[in-house]
Amino acid sequence: MRMWGCVLVAALLAGCNGSAPSPEPTEPPAKASAAVTVEGPERRILAFGDSLFAGYRLNDGEGYPDRLQAALRARGINATVIDAGVSGDTSAAALQRVAFVLDSLAATPDLALVELGGNDLLRGISPDETRANLSRILVALRERDIPVLLMGMRAPPNLGEAYIAEFDGMYRDLAGRSGARLVPFFLEPIYDKPALLQLDHIHPTAGGVDALVDATVDDVAEALPKAD
C-alpha cells in the first residue's frame, strides 16, 4: 500500500494530461483457445469509465474492454464489449455524458461496468460529491433496466483515515443501495506489481490488463443476466 499512496496523485495527473512516458514493451496477450465454440445470443456489455477502460498508451486491442471480450468469448459467451472509457473523466464528467452514451447505442446493453473515482481523488473532490455523481449514474442505468457491475477504487493512505473510510466505503454502500454487483478494488491484482504497470506506476501494461481481466472475468460473467 505504501507505493500506491506515493504514486497515485502523480500517476493520475499523467493519465489526465497525457505526459506519462511510454510503457516498456510487453509480451503480446495470450490468444484465446480456438477449440471453444462461441454460441448463444449476443451479450452486449458497456464498459463505462476513465483511462483504465480507455486503454491509455496501449496498442489497439490491448485495452481492458477488448481483452475482456476475448476472455468471455474464450468461454463460449457471445460477448461484445463496448468501450466507453474516456481518459481523465471525473465522476461529474461521466455523469454529464452517460445519457448521451446510452442514447447512442444501437441496443440496450445487457450489463454495464462502471469504473470511476480515481480522477476525483486527483482533484481533491470530496467523497460526498463523488458519491452523489456515481449514485446518479447508477440511477440512470437502473432506469433503463441495465444491471451494473461497479468497479471500486481505493484511496491512498496519505489522505488520512477519515477520507479513506469515507471514500473506500462509498463503493460498497452504493452497490448495496442500488443492487449493483461490486468488485471492491479494480486494481487489486496489479497496484503493487511494477512489472504489470506502465512507467507512471498506475496504468496497466498489456500484461497488466490481462491480469485485471483474469481477476474480474468471473465477476463479469456472473453479473450477466441469463439469456432468454
Image: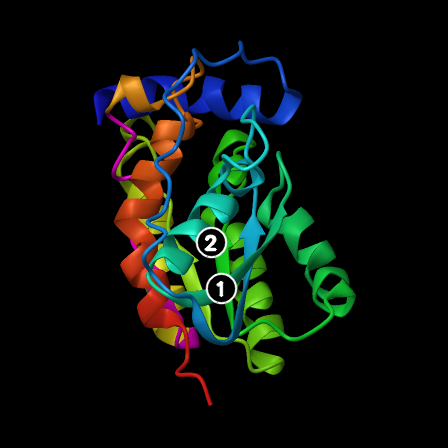
Residue type at mark 2: give it.
Gln
Q: Label 2: which residue?
A: 69
Q: Position of residue 27 (x, y in %)?
A: 36, 21
Residue type at mark 1: give it.
Ala
Instruction: Give the residue displayed 43% in from the left and 11% down from the top.
Output: 24
Note whether 147 is above or below 61 in the view shown: below
| Residue 122: numbered disc | none
Callout 1: helix, strand or loop?
Answer: strand
**Mark 2 crowdedness (10 Å alpha carbons): few <14, some 14-19, many ≥20:** many
Q: Nearer the viewer, residue 146 or 221?
A: 221
Q: Are marks 2 and 1 in contact (CB under 8 Å)?
A: yes
Q: Quadrant of residue 42?
A: bottom right
Q: Position of residue 60 (x, y in %)?
A: 59, 33
**Mark 1 crowdedness (10 Å alpha carbons): few <14, some 14-19, many ≥20:** many
The answer, for residue 204, to whether it is visible in the render is no
Tell me if 225 is positioned left or right of 58 in this view: left
Instruction: Give the residue displayed 32% in from the left and 24% down from the top.
Output: 196
Q: Nearer the viewer, residue 57 or 9?
A: 57
Note whether 171 is above or below 156 in the view shown: below
Q: Which secondary structure dominates the residues rendered in magenta?
A: loop
Q: Label 1: which residue?
A: 79
In the image, the segment drawn in magenta is 178-192
The answer, for residue 46, to whether it is visible in the render is yes
Q: Nearer the viewer, residue 93 or 226?
A: 226
Callout 2: helix, strand or loop?
Answer: helix
